[in-house]
Image (cartoon, rainbow, N blue to C red):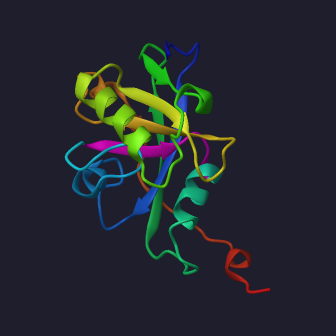
Amino acid sequence: MVSRHSGSLRAFRIADMRHTIFDGTGAMLHGARWNSPGRRIIYAAETYAGALLEILVHASGNVPKGQGYIEIEIPAALSIEEIAPEDLPRWDSPSFEAARKFGNRWYDERRTPVAIVPSVVTLVERNVLINQEHPDFARIRASEPRPVRWDARLWKRA
């Protein structure tokens, strides 16, 4: 479903500060749930907490070093494609097949600069995909990176 929001949409991205955070090179080089390699997509979350959880799920019990976050502002005038879990059977499959098929087509067709998709980590919140090659990408703004502060209680062993 393609929609326009009544106000601007805010998203958050956390990544290693040794690299440009507002950039989809990692997804382009390695692929991810919603894209095969070769497609420059910036992955973000609708909330800061959602972005933290997306990092933690891949941290293997170690405190991620040198992480920073950015706040992304998506103008209300931009079209956004929204996918609900029931709209795409098997989107959460470990093989990524259904999610990648959707994401690759969305990206290749340049349907919208932004897609909102379900989060496997929370199943309640959503992730925000930004097509860095879309003609409207230049209208999306990101803050300067700020360091992530990890609460030590996240790493306590029971």
- Residue 17 in picture, x, y percent from top left: 37, 65
- Residue 44 in picture, x, y percent from top left: 47, 45
- Which residue is pictured at 22% across the width and 56% down the height? 29
- Residue 26 in picture, x, y percent from top left: 29, 56
Q: Is residue 14 above or below residue 130?
A: below
- Which residue is pictured at 42% across the width and 16% down the height? 79
> Quarter of the image containing the C terminus?
bottom right
- Which residue is pictured at 24% across the width and 50% down the height? 37
Q: Residue furthest right?
A: 158
Q: Residue furthest left?
A: 38
Q: Which region is colored magenta? A: 40-48
18 sits to left or right of 73: left
Query: Which residue occupies the foreground of this view, 91 or 15?
Result: 91
27 sits to left or right of 73: left
- Does the magenta-highlighted stretch encompass residue 127? no
Query: Which residue occupies the foreground of this view, 32 or 131?
Result: 32
Query: Which residue occupies the foreground of this view, 74 or 145?
Result: 74
- Which residue is pictured at 53% across the width and 22% down the height? 8
68 sits to left or right of 126: left
Q: Is residue 117 above or below residue 17?
A: above
Q: Is residue 109 above or below residue 63?
A: above
Could you tell me if residue 148 is visible in this image?
no
How many numbered dots are placed on residues in this image?
A: 0
Query: Which residue occupies the foreground of this view, 120 or 16?
Result: 120
158 sits to left or right of 8: right
- Residue 93 in picture, x, y percent from top left: 51, 49
Could you tell me if residue 98 is visible in this image?
yes
